[in-house]
Amino acid sequence: MEKRLYFVFGDVLACTSLGAAAGWLTYAVLPQNWWFGVAMVLGMFLGMVVGALGGFLFSPFFGAMEIALPTALAGMMAGMAGGMQAVMSGTGGAEALQSGAGIGILCLAFTYLLQSQLQGEVD
Amino acid sequence: MDERAQKRWDKAAALYDLTGGFGPEKRWLPHKTRLFSGMQGKVLFLAAGTGLDFAAFPPGQDITAIDISAGMLEKAAPRAASYQGNMTLRQMNVHQMDFAAASFDQVYTSCTFCSVSDPVAGLRALRHVLKPGGQLAMFEHTGSRTFPFGLMLDVMNPLCRYLGPEVNRDTVANVEAAGFAIEKVSNVYLDVVKTIEARAPSDEQT
């Protein structure tokens, strides 16, 4: 698991900012009158694109796959949540932004946990 | 020579150090240094790229580094010149290498077989230039068998393939399919970035 603070900082920065961006963007572009399921699936796809492409901004500073995979996952999950929020009444862009950032952190924690299990010699 | 691939990497050479020279290389340096520390004898290295990997090579080795792109090799030249050992750069496609059979004791690769057009044929070509019983050591990114990353890499692959490297190859299986015996596989990042150590069959096995 990554223990160098510089790279941990980069992972957190990339996943929170791109999670927030994906959440807000899907909330902003998906119409409120769409069916819940369609908004969720389209949000996932749009979010993954945001996360994967946004990863290119952070990659030169913090790593290649170590940035691309968690940010794509964070974007996908935050986009799904943003899509759901878009069609739900009573939520706003600020909520989509916040939940996207939180989902980004959760996705990063998931990849760190997975990394602790997968790293090292394979049988 | 695969002119399309050559042109693509020639173009990429201009920004290659900017995009991959700091973050990715610093992150992978300890793992690459560990893998490359096993270099001994006459070593073939591919793909040289702009020579970013040379910093992880142990000094005093006899290394021939090849790359398909003249643009990449032009950038790699100063790094090769400052290497504390014997290093020769050659522009060459792995599918059309002009080395004699059994020329090398070891072959090392670094993020290469995501881009080689026919990976099993390329690995067979490496086996041909390796001495019987010679070692193949690879630092590569591959597909994943872990959910959801395997699925995500499959979804992203068509776009990545268009831009250059493929991101869902089963390189361990390709190494076996090319006739090498796998000795050790270690995951560096998830089950995506990994080191693969394998051996060409010895004389008795061929």
Image: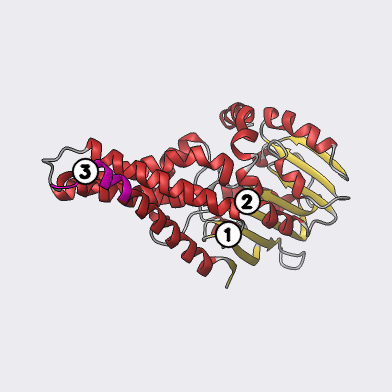
Q: In the rendered image, which residue does mark 3 sit on? A: A92
- Chain letter behind tag 2: B
Left or right: A2 with respect to B155? right
Q: Are marks 2 and 3 in contact (CB under 8 Å)?
A: no
Element marked by disc 1: loop
Magenta segment's dominant SS is helix
Amino acid type, label 1: Glu
- Circle 1 residue: A2
Relative height, residue A121 to residue A2 (above, below): below
Secondary structure of the residue carrying tag 3 is: loop
Amino acid type, callout 2: Arg
The one of A47 and B60 positioned closer to us in this rendering:
A47
Judge depth for marks 2 and 3 and give the one in front. 3
Where residue A35 appears, x then y in whole percent? 12, 46
Relative placement, left or right, of B76 versus B11 is right
Residue visible at 26% across and 51% down in the picture = A81
